Image (cartoon, rainbow, N blue to C red):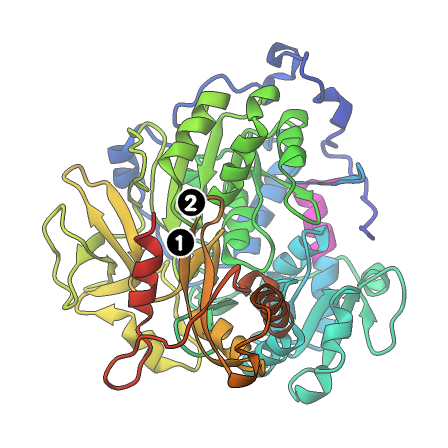
C-alpha cells in the first residue's frame, strides 16, 4: 500500500511510538499529562438540559468546513494553541503508521485540490465518485473536494460492476477516484458513462487510461484558494437503499453535514482537542463522514484509523490497549463479537467513552461490556438523511434497550399516520418537526426523485421511516422499520435489490426478502424462494449455496441472503402484492 511521505514541519511533531503504549503492565500515571483521562463526566456540557439550552447554532450564508474549521485548527496549531496530538493517526496490520498534523493535512489536501481542479479540469459543482478503503488518501479526497467545491459521491469497495455503472450514470460523475482493486470493475463500464472525463488511481504503478495520484500530487503546487461556498450549496451525496427501486441519492449541503455534525462531536461524542477518537465504520457509508471526518475535526480531536481488511475482534481489542484511544465508536454487531472475545483480558488505559450506532443494541451485550470493561455504551440514533437524531449522552441515566433522548438538533416526536403527536407510551412513527422551520441539518433532497422526497413528509413532520415509542421520561425506544428495509450489522439493505438479484437466476420463479433475527448481526437477510419446475428436486443445500454465490456476484456481497427457505407459494394481497409483513412476522415470532 502506498502512502504519502510525511513532510516535516517546525511546529509540533508528534513522535509518540507504538511501544510506548503497548504492554498491560504500563500504568496511566506514566503517560504524558495530555494522555491521562480520569473522569467520564461531560466535558462540553453539564447535563442533558444544559446541552439543550446551549445548542444555538448560527448558520451563516457562506460556510465551508475546510476553510471555517480545518484551516482554523491549522492556524491555532501554528501558534501552539493546539494540543500535541496529531489531527490524523493511521495504522495498519503491518505496523505502519502515519501521523499528520492539521498543517500536514492542509499541505497534502491543497495539492490534491490542485490535481482535481487543474489536472482533471473539474469546476465547482462537478461530481467526483470515490471508492477507497481506509487509506489516508480517502480523507485527503474528502478535504480536497470541499476545498474545490466539487460534490463528493461516496461508494463502498463492496460494490459490483452493475452497482458502479448505476451510480456513475445517475450521479453524472465527471471523475472517479479508486485503487487497483476496483480499477478492473470500473474500466469496462467507463465507456458507457458519457459524463466521465477523468480517472484517478491510487497505485504504485502506472495504469493506461488513469492518472496516477502520487505522480500528479508530487508535481502539483501546494497553494490553493478554498472556494467561498454557500451554506446551502451541494457538498456530498450518499446512496441509501429503500423498499423499492434502486438506491436513492441523498444530497447534503455544506452546512447540513459540515456544520450540522457539530452536535455529534460536541455533545454525543463529547470530544475535545485532547481526545483520540476511533470510529470503525467502513468508508463509503454516511457514518464514516459523521464520525471519521466532520464530528471529530469540528472539535479538533485526533482521528484514529486502523486499516484492517476485515473486522478482527482480537486486533480491535489489542489496538484499544496499545494506543491512547479515549473515545471508541462501533456498531452493535461489533460489540456482540467483542464481548465473546472477553475484553477483560485487555487493559484499556486511556479509554473512557464508548458509543454505538447503526442498529439497536441488545441490553445483554451492553451489560456484558460494562461487566468486562467497567465502561458503559452510549447509543446514538440517526440516518444518512440526518445528523444525530437522538442519543444517550454523558450524565444521563442509561435505560438498556432505549437509544436515549432527542438530540438538541431536532424536535423529535412520535406521530401517527396523519402527522399528529401520539400520547407517551404509544407506538408511532419517529418524526422530526420541519414546520415552521426546517432544520438546516436535514438532507436537501433525493436527487431526481421529488416523489420519494415528498413521501418523507407528513403534516409538520419529516418521517424517519422508523417506528418507536417515547416513555414518560422522554426516552425513546426503537420498535422497527415502518417499511421493509433490513438493518443488518449496521448495513441498510432494501429487499427489492436482493429480490432483483435472485430473479436473475434460472432456478427462481419468485422470491420475497425480509429480515430474520440473528444473535450476532441483530437481523439478517432471509429469502423465501419459489423454484422453477426444473429445480424443484435439486439438492436444497447445494442450491442455497449457489443462490447465495449468485447474489454476491450480482449485487454488493453484504446483501446476500444468509438464510433461504424454499416455499410453494408466497402470501399476497388481493391485488397481487407480496405480503412481506406476514413473512417477517413469522420469522420474529420464533424468538
Mark linked to residue 522: none
Badge 2 marks a residue whose secondary structure is helix
Please tell me whether residue 106 belongs to the stretch shown in magenta: yes
Magenta segment boundaries in residue numbering: 98-109
Which one is earlier in the sequence, the residue at label 2 or at label 1?
2
Vertical order, 348 against 96 (above or below):
above
Q: Residue at x 27, y 64 (%)?
A: 463
Label 1 neighbour load within 10 Å: few <14, some 14-19, many 20+:
many
Mark 2 near mark 1, Cβ–Cβ under 8 Å? Answer: yes
Q: Is residue 199 left or right of residue 238?
A: right
Asked which quadrant contains residue 283, the reply is: bottom right
What residue is shown with label 1?
Answer: 387
Asked which quadrant contains residue 583, the reply is: bottom left
Q: Residue at x 76, y 78 (%)?
A: 187
Near-viewer residue (135 or 43): 135
Is residue 569 at all visible to an observer of this figure? Answer: yes
Amino acid at each position: 500500500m502506498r502512502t504519502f511521505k510525511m513532510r516535516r514541519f517546525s511546529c509540533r511533531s508528534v513522535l509518540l511510538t507504538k511501544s510506548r503504549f503497548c504492554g498491560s503492565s504500563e500504568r496511566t500515571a506514566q503517560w504524558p499529562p495530555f494522555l491521562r483521562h480520569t473522569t467520564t463526566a461531560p466535558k462540553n456540557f453539564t447535563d442533558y438540559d444544559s446541552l439543550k439550552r446551549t445548542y444555538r447554532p448560527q448558520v451563516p450564508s457562506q460556510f465551508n468546513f475546510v476553510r471555517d474549521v480545518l484551516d482554523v485548527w491549522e492556524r491555532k496549531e501554528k501558534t501552539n494553541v493546539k494540543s500535541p496530538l496529531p489531527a490524523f493517526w493511521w495504522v495498519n496490520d503491518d505496523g505502519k503508521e502515519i501521523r499528520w498534523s492539521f498543517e500536514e493535512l492542509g499541505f497534502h489536501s491543497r495539492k490534491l485540490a490542485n490535481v482535481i481542479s487543474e489536472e482533471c479540469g473539474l469546476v465547482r459543482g462537478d461530481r467526483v465518485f470515490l471508492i477507497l478503503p481506509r487509506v489516508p488518501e480517502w480523507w485527503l479526497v474528502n478535504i480536497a473536494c470541499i476545498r474545490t467545491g466539487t460534490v463528493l459521491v461516496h461508494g463502498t469497495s463492496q460494490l459490483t460492476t452493475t452497482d458502479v455503472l448505476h451510480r456513475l450514470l445517475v450521479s453524472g460523475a465527471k471523475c472517479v477516484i479508486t485503487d487497483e482493486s476496483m480499477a478492473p470493475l470500473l474500466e469496462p463500464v467507463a465507456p458507457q458513462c458519457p459524463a466521465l472525463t477523468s480517472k484517478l488511481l491510487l497505485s504504485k504503478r502506472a495504469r493506461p487510461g488513469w492518472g496516477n495520484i502520487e505522480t500528479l500530487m508530487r508535481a502539483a503546487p501546494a497553494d490553493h484558494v478554498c472556494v467561498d461556498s454557500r451554506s446551502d450549496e451541494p457538498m456530498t451525496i450518499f446512496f441509501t437503499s429503500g423498499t423499492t427501486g434502486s438506491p436513492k441519492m441523498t444530497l447534503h449541503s455544506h452546512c447540513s453535514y459540515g456544520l450540522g455534525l457539530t452536535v455529534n462531536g460536541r455533545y454525543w461524542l463529547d470530544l475535545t482537542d485532547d481526545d483520540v477518537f476511533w470510529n470503525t465504520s467502513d468508508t463509503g457509508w454516511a457514518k464514516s463522514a459523521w464520525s471519521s471526518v466532520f464530528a471529530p475535526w469540528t472539535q479538533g480531536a485526533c482521528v484514529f484509523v486502523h486499516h484492517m481488511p476485515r473486522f478482527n475482534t482480537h486486533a480491535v481489542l489489542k489496538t484499544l490497549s496499545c494506543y491512547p484511544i479515549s473515545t471508541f465508536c462501533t456498531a452493535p454487531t461489533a460489540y456482540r463479537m467483542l464481548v465473546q472475545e472477553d475484553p477483560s483480558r485487555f487493559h484499556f488505559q486511556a479509554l473512557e467513552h464508548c458509543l454505538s450506532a447503526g442498529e439497536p443494541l441488545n441490553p445483554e451485550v451492553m451489560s456484558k461490556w460494562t461487566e468486562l470493561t467497567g465502561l458503559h455504551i452510549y447509543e446514538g440514533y440517526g440516518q444518512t438523511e440526518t445528523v444525530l437524531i437522538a442519543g444517550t449522552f454523558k450524565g444521563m441515566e442509561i435505560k438498556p434497550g432505549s437509544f436515549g433522548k432527542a438530540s438538541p438538533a431536532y424536535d423529535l416526536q412520535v406521530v401517527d399516520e396523519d402527522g399528529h403527536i401520539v400520547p407517551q407510551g404509544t407506538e408511532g412513527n419517529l418524526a422530526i418537526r420541519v414546520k415552521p422551520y426546517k432544520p438546516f441539518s436535514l438532507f436537501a433532497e433525493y436527487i431526481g426523485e421529488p416523489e420519494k422526497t415528498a413521501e418523507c413528509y407528513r403534516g409538520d413532520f419529516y418521517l424517519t421511516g422508523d417506528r418507536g415509542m417515547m416513555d414518560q421520561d422522554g426516552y425513546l425506544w426503537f420498535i422497527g422499520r415502518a417499511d421493509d428495509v433490513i438493518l443488518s450489522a449496521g448495513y441498510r439493505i432494501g429487499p427489492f435489490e436482493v429480490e432483483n438479484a435472485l430473479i436473475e437466476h434460472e432456478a427462481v420463479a419468485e422470491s420475497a426478502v425480509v429480515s430474520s433475527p440473528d444473535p450476532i448481526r441483530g437481523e439478517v437477510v432471509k429469502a423465501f424462494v419459489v423454484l422453477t419446475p426444473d429445480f424443484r428436486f435439486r439438492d436444497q443445500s447445494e442450491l442455497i449455496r449457489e443462490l447465495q454465490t449468485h447474489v454476491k456476484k450480482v449485487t454488493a456481497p453484504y446483501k446476500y441472503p444468509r438464510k433461504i427457505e424454499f416455499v410453494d407459494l408466497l402470501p399476497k394481497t388481493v391485488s397481487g402484492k407480496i405480503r412481506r409483513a406476514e413473512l417477517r412476522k413469522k420469522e420474529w415470532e420464533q424468538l
